[in-house]
Image (cartoon, helix red, strand yellow):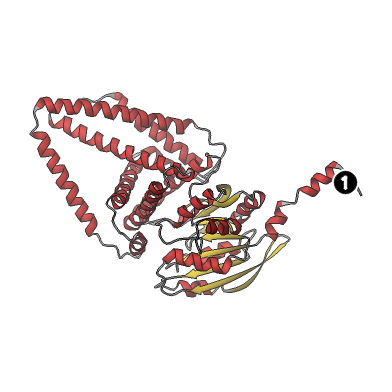
Amino acid sequence: MESTPVQLEELLKIPSQSRINTSSVAAIIPAYNEEDSIEATIESLLSQTRPPNAVFVMVNNCTDETFYVANAFAGVHELKHREDRFTCEVVVVDMGTNEDKKVGALNLGWSMAEGYDYILGVDGDTVLDKKCVQHLMSEMVEDSRIGGISAIYGFDQTAIKGPGGGFLVRSQRFQFAGFNLDNLLRSRNMAVLGGQCSLLSVTAMRRTMEANHQTAPWVTDSEIEDSLLSIQLRTAGYRTKISSAARANVGAMVTLRSLNAQQVKWNAGGVELMLQNPTHPNLRLRWRENIGMFTNLLSRIMFVLLVSAALSVGVFHYDWWWLIPPVVSIILNLRIAMAMKDHTFRDVSYALFLIPGEIYMAIRGVHFIEAWGQIIGRQEHDNWAAQANAENGAAKGGKVALAFVAVVAILGAMTYGWLHLDPLIQAGILSVGWISLAVLTIIQTVVMLGKVFRNHKGFKV
């Protein structure tokens, strides 16, 4: 019987839910000392509206009870959502000592899961929203050009403990929100498919491996394996996207040491990739972030030094327009806070008071300088081990003390030199310095205004 145009259209339009249910997906969880969080991670996967067909928990280098907590879920689970029935097998592998750490765990998981259509990479401290996998898969099955798609990352604020931890978690919340928003407004092109929760096409990964002559998708010669894989997927012609709807709460760093180790690892790995692939589309946002961080640090250091120098010779003069950049910064932070899904009064207060954000900017500046120092100095440094030690509370503070002594020594030498300069030279330095700072601040303020007035298109981060 000949189909009418309407019937033909319906025949060609296969329901996306059917394709989501018939496509197979396996979750890989590289778990390192996650005894406090792995249970919630596995439970969030099993309670999905479209759960994975398999979950492979790769326990590696653990010194705690992660294996035994995870192994309680081992076996086949019969799951149901409305009228749909699913089967999910949870497999827990104790890898023991694994020299390749997370990369080794991911690659062993890949060898067990490559028979599936899609692989969902999930960290052992990530909790997925109930519809996270469904949203990720609905976008993936609709567009074969997508090689990988990431969830929007947030933090569970109910887990915040103490004022110090609260400050760090809220600061990371703003950092991630700004990053997610930038990616969403760039046609949802994701610079980095974060390993916290990203869905990857097995077909795309195989072709990427062939193109790069690799035996496994993840390699050990990069500090940030997820960024490198994202670049390789994009180079192979696939798109890397961020979902507009899929959400997951990720593990936050709640101590300065663990935050420093994580951010230095990310920054150093990112800088290395930038220098190796300076024009790659996926790294344009990283270039902008690094240039922005450099100018932010430079402007703040210049302001403190110029004010101190002017006060020391009695020529300091305040101008009202100095308030414009901080006010614009507050407005921008407020826009980011209001763009957060389920934002709270504390998020708004954080944006309004400015000082917490400035403190966190200084902390990030330290990470930024340390990361660039490693790359420029060609230092051989195991940032994976440094992060692991920091999270376990085993990091040493000698490096911090040495850096403090070095800064004090530099400032002391600068102060001595400044006070012994000829007054005419001092005046010249101040004049050039204030003009340079004014130009830099104007550029930064214009950039911030551009972000203030840009259309968020209804996206929530």
Label 1 is placed on what type of residue? Ser
The residue carrying pointer 1 sits among few (fewer than 14), some (14 to 19) or many (20 or more) residues within 10 Å by Cα, namely few
**In the rendered image, the vertical position of residue 16 relative to residue 40, given as above or below:** above
Question: How many numbered marks are there?
Answer: 1
Residue 144 visible to the viewer: yes
Q: Quadrant of residue 391?
A: bottom left
**In the rendered image, the vertical position of residue 289 relative to residue 387, given as above or below:** above
Q: Residue at x 21, y 32 (%)?
A: 306
Q: Nearer the viewer, residue 29 or 286?
A: 286
Q: Position of residue 219 (x, y in %)?
A: 45, 61
Q: Nearer the viewer, residue 188 or 397?
A: 188
Q: Position of residue 222 (x, y in %)?
A: 41, 57
Q: Secondary structure at mark 1?
A: loop
Task: From the viewer's perspective, tell me whether residue 384 is left or right of residue 194.
Answer: left
Task: From the viewer's perspective, tell me whether residue 74 is left or right of residue 326.
Answer: right
Q: Position of residue 46 (x, y in %)?
A: 60, 64
Q: Position of residue 193 (x, y in %)?
A: 50, 52
Residue 344 visible to the viewer: no
Q: Nearer the viewer, residue 241 or 212?
A: 212
**In the rendered image, the vertical position of residue 364 relative to residue 322, given as above or below:** below
Q: Quadrant of residue 422?
A: top left
Q: Residue at x 87, y 43 (%)?
A: 4
Q: Disc 1 marks which residue?
A: 3
Q: Residue at x 28, y 30 (%)?
A: 437
Task: From the viewer's perspective, tell me whether residue 161 is left or right of residue 133.
Answer: left
